Image (cartoon, helix red, strand yellow):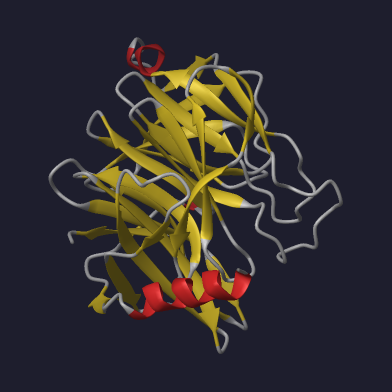
Amino acid sequence: MRNLFLFVYFLCLAATAQQNLKIRGDKELPAGLREISGAVFWDGMLWAHNDGGDEPVLYALDTTDFKIRKKIHVQNAINTDWEDIAQDETHIYIGDIGNNSGNRNYLQVYKIAKKDIAASGADSVSVRPQIISFSYKDKPAVTQKKHRHNYDAEAMAVANGKLYIFSKNWLRGPSLVYATDTAAGAYVLAPVCTLGTNFLVTGAEFYEGRLWVCGYHIELKIEKIYAASFAWPPAEGAVLNMEKLYAFSPSFRQLETIAAIPGRGFFLAFEELQAGGVGSGPGVFRFVP
């Protein structure tokens, strides 16, 4: 059965034509977002956060110069490993879902009402979140090996009252998709479908009836970055083939997040990357499929 699954998986990858695009007009992000990990576009601004270790703060960026205009402090929260952000009509969801080492058994999402953010015109606002906590039903009880497991996640998106979480499969296999209600509470999640990707998924967004994900993989010590689309919604248990696959260059960047701009494509952002004496700062670019 496993061999059949792998055959179908690689057949799906082979059927997807890759389009190569050159990044143009990318903008530098502030040093305060050198580890940008998630972003959404709402109310005319790009709302972003850093990876684990930063303060539990959401930053609002002007989309003309990408300067920080506002800070949202999330009360009673810890940025253990904030990895992505999602939204629906009324709320923003910040995912403390990172699990590089594989030893986190309980993860959580901070749910923030948009009205609490919009109610204040101040440059610095404090908000009190609701909490969605969860664990993976299929995760073994034993501690996983760092970067050698499929129970890390860096991507979330909301559609039709469900919060979807996408695994970052460090073994370079498909991404497992989990779903939970958006109501505060504690949940045990099982996979609902699988994405046939050939890269590590780091961001997700729903756009014009399709699921879009972004990510990267390292080949011969060169980091390559991608975006891909999938038909949605899936049948339960389905293995989804990529409809479109885009590879961006120059590729020495760690692509972390994708944010839809209604009717105008996406913002894609990458964090600061330093390796072997070569590096790049954090930045953002527009992508219109």
Task: Spot the residue most to the right.
Answer: 142
**Place of residue 247 in the rendered image (x, y in percent of width and height, measured from the top left):** 33, 75
**Place of residue 121 in the rendered image (x, y in percent of width and height, measured from the top left):** 33, 15
Residue 16 lies, with reference to residue 194, above or below; the image says below
Residue drawn at (33%, 28%) of the image: 160
Residue 203 lies, with reference to residue 190, above or below; the image says below
Residue 236, picture quadrant: top left
Q: Can residue 280 be seen in this view?
A: no
Q: Is residue 186 visible?
A: yes
- Residue closer to the observer: 110 or 150: 150
Residue 181 lies, with reference to residue 208, above or below; the image says above
Residue 188, picture quadrant: top right
- Residue closer to the observer: 65 or 210: 210
Residue drawn at (65%, 58%) of the image: 150
> Horizontally, is 68 left or right of 77 in the view?
left
- Residue closer to the observer: 242 or 286: 242
Look at the image and tell me in which quarter the N terminus lies: bottom right
Residue drawn at (35%, 39%) of the image: 40
**Place of residue 213 in the rendered image (x, y in percent of width and height, measured from the top left):** 38, 56
Look at the image and tell me in which quarter the C terminus lies: bottom left
> Horizontally, is 120 left or right of 34 in the view?
left
> Horizontally, is 96 left or right of 157 in the view?
right
Task: Spot the residue most to the bottom.
Answer: 220
Residue 24, picture quadrant: bottom left
Residue 163 lies, with reference to residue 50, above or below; the image says above
Task: Spot the residue most to the left.
Answer: 263
**Place of residue 67 in the rendered image (x, y in percent of width and height, measured from the top left):** 34, 43
- Residue closer to the observer: 18 or 67: 18
Count of numbered circles in the view:
0
